[in-house]
Amino acid sequence: MYGEIIIKRTNDLREIPDELKNIIKNIIETRADFELAMVEQYSPWLVNAPNVDGRLFMAKIVSDELNHGWQLIRLLENFNVNTEKIQNARLGLHLLEVSNLPLFNWEDVISYVYLIDRAGLYQLRAIKDIIYEPLANLASSLAKEEEYHLHFSYNVLRSYEEKKRMQGALNFWFPRAVEMINQLNNVIGSKLYLEQLNIVDISVNEFIKSVNEELSKLGFSQIDPYKTMVLH
């Protein structure tokens, strides 16, 4: 329907066709739920992180994700959406499957930040030029903070002594990061919508290749996420 229509970047939702507007709303809802779910998943580690540096990082990341969720909730108000369900969702009720899993140990936490936050960063980069300007601007801002989260997890992985334990956590979370990207792509649907919304297609293969190359440099084994989908 919109294949030959050029839709300019705008602040005004009235200038965006309803079908595309609904996809934008779904993107924001999914992202808001994801951010608020991470607050719930990370919060126990404010006191349970193994050292002061870890606890300080958890305080930073919980604060960041809560602020991200709040900003996205405010953005949803432009769509006249009732956000109570998202704000009140708890473990087991979140939109993305990966958001419904607890983090049992520090290896889970670091692997989650390194892989799941990375998948989330790929999404933010994909939508940073979306036609709805308030979301484009917010995505660019959030991406900068997510990059800091990844930097911390990278440094932990680089110096982590219990490589075998960490490898097990990475094996568990990698396929779930890939699954998350697929779920995020499904929110958008047709590649035609990608073009009209000015969203970059998130390449699962590129994600897998990039992660595995970095894992090798960090001294970990490469992972086939399609063969390591195991129960926790």
Image (cartoon, rainbow, N blue to C red):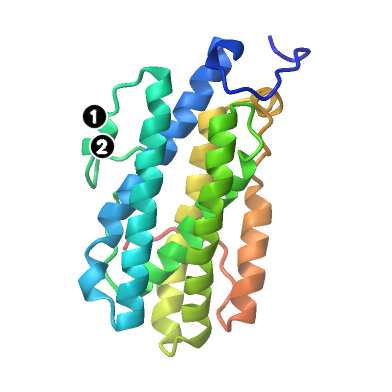
Q: Nearer the viewer, residue 232 or 88?
A: 88
Q: Place residue 84 in its image quadrant.
A: top left
Per the image, label 1 sits on a secondary structure element best described as: helix
Which quadrant, please, contains the N terminus?
A: top right
**Residue holding disc 2:** 87
Q: Percent x, y for residue 120?
A: 51, 50
* Disc 1: CA contacts within 10 A as few (<14), some (14-19) or many (>=20): few
Q: CA distance from mark 2 to mark 1?
A: 5 Å
**Residue holding disc 1:** 84
Amino acid type shown at disc 2: Gln
Q: Nearer the viewer, residue 128 or 183?
A: 128
Residues tagged 2 and 1 counted as in contact (Cβ below 8 A): yes
* Disc 2: CA contacts within 10 A as few (<14), some (14-19) or many (>=20): some
Residue 175 placement, left or right of 193: left
Give the number of callouts: 2
- Residue lying at the far right of the rendered structure: 4
Residue 203 placement, left or right of 180: right
Q: Residue at x 66, y 34 (%)?
A: 199
Amino acid type shown at disc 1: Glu
Q: Place residue 105 in its image quadrant.
A: bottom left
Q: Percent x, y for residue 45?
A: 26, 69
Q: Residue at x 28, y 76 (%)?
A: 49
Q: Residue at x 43, y 30 (%)?
A: 75
Compared with 3, 165 (above or below) is below
